[in-house]
Amino acid sequence: MSVLTQHAPQNARETGGFAGGIAAIDEGKLYALQNPFALDGRVSSYPASARGYSVANSYLITQSDAAMLIDTGFGKDEPAIRAQVESLIAPGLPLSLFPLRLNEFMSINNVEAFAGHFNVETCYTSNVDAALWFDFGAKANGRSILESMKVTAVTRADTIRLGQRDRAIDVMQAPIRLIATRWLYDRATRTLFSSDMFTHVWRARESGPWIVTDEDDRTSARELRSFLLNTRYWWLEGAPTGSIRRGIAEVFEKCDVETIAPGYGCILHGRAVVARHVAMLDEVLASLDKSVATSRYVGRDEER
């Protein structure tokens, strides 16, 4: 069973003023690189009325001969994330990148910067024209860095073998999504990387905590429903959700999930917590199905 521990935040002076934190999901195997941001009505990933803080998560899968960074974070956090990665892997260690959402800054913003700084072995994507997707840098040689970076295309159902030990990381098309999105499952730590799903827990304070355990799991199905309908999943009310529910159930039947690691928001840790949030999501999706709910126009400022 993995044990979550919180590392001290990175030194703000060393990271250009952006002080993030590292959570060890499984020491020596998997780390969450976490950088908080304020919820003040301007963040479209959260309801307009949400106040407090959430956190952008990048995940570093590590072993002695290779590492993989899942999502590269916002550009503003690049110094902090770079320092976090440097504190966890040896200089020159082969590093793979896997941005799960090609359309979102939170996922792809720092691909170019990290490709130019680390020994990036490959970038996993569903599209091979990475130089066109990741060209956010201000450096004149940014495009050449991206064009020389090896890109490995993955399918909707694939398995990555990391390093000489062939650590298995399963790739799957997200069963619920708004944009092209991949989910990953790390068999070694029993962690599901759920990208922009299970992102519904935020905190009142910038300090978090950013991990939900049995002791502080207070989210209700009603709150989850409101979160979905007031963010990117507004279209679910009155949609045919049966196939979505089956797709999600198949993932959790196939994968032994102990930790759900979303792209932003709190990490859900522990079998009981995972089971509860999966059950709540299924309950909400059932209540929104077209057989019991009516699809309608939703005004921009309406919250449900």
Image (tube, rainbow, N blue to C red):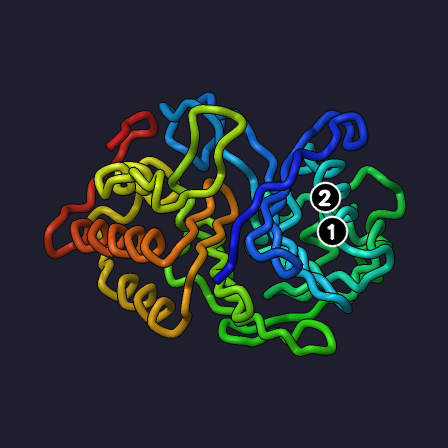
Q: Residue at x 84, y 51 (%)?
A: 116
**Amino acid at circle 2:** Gln
Q: Nearer the viewer, residue 8 or 14?
A: 8
Disc 1: which residue = 88
Marks 1 & 2, CB-CB < 8 Å contact? yes
Q: Nearer the viewer, residue 131 or 304?
A: 304
Seen in the picture, residue 131 relative to 138 is either above or below; the reply is below
- Counting from the top left corner in percent of width and height, residue 271 is at 36, 58
**Amino acid at circle 1:** Leu
Q: Is residue 37 left or right of residue 266?
A: right
Q: Which mark is residue 84?
A: 2
Choose top left, top right, bottom left or bottom right for residue 165.
bottom right
| Residue 12 visible to an observer of this rendering | yes
Q: Residue at x 43, y 25 (%)?
A: 204
Q: Residue at x 76, y 43 (%)?
A: 82
Choose top left, top right, bottom left or bottom right for residue 61.
bottom right
